[in-house]
Image (cartoon, rainbow, N blue to C red):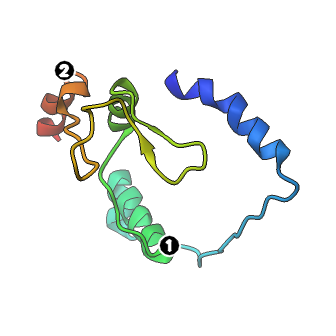
Amino acid sequence: QPAACCLPLLQLRLMCQLSNAVTVEMLPPYIPSAEEKADPVLYAANIRKLIADALGVPLVDQDRSHFLALVNAGVGVSWDGTRLTAPPGVLDERGCMDLQPYLPANFAKAKKQQ
């Protein structure tokens, strides 16, 4: 796995910090509707939206294929986590890139079937 190489580095960074703070927000229990009980995908989508709303962030439709495309393109995150790093020519002037050449060949076909 491409991300497995980063795990020892992340563990070292975590252990070298004198203090690590975390904030936990407990949401009220969510009772699924009859439709959600019959359709786990609908239930998961509604839970995702509930959590995103609680965090104040937008939902983004991406999966592991997108992450692997970025890894295959050589895109990473800087040591301090504040900026993207990429080989010359991968990102455009706005810092964006076309993932299509780096996605698996069957990715577009699988998305159309959904």
Residue sitting at x 15%, y 32%:
108
Report whether residue 44 is seen: yes
Can you give x and y, in whole percent of width and height, for residue 52 in the image? 43, 68
Mark 2 is surrounded, within 10 Å at the Cα level, by few (under 14), some (14 to 19) or many (20 or more) other residues, namely few
Residue sitting at x 19%, y 20%:
105
Location of residue 98 with respect to 72 vertically, above or below: below
Instruction: Say which quarter of the image contains residue 85.
Output: top left
Q: Which residue is mark 1?
A: 55
Residue sitting at x 32%, y 58%:
42
Indicate the quadrant containing the C terminus: top left, top right, bottom left or bottom right.
top left
Q: Which residue is mark 2?
A: 105
Q: Amino acid at mark 2?
A: Ala
Can you give x and y, in whole percent of width and height, for residue 41 in the image? 34, 52
Can you give x and y, in whole percent of width and height, for residue 109 in the image? 13, 29
Report whether residue 37 is seen: no
The residue closer to the viewer here, 94 or 29, is: 94
Instruction: Say which quarter of the image contains residue 8.
Output: top right
Secondary element under disc 1, as helix, strand or loop, is helix
**Residue 43's disc number:** none
Q: Amino acid at mark 1?
A: Leu
Q: Earlier in the sequence, mark 2 or mark 1?
A: 1
Q: CA distance from mark 2 to mark 1?
A: 34 Å
Total number of numbered discs in the rendering: 2
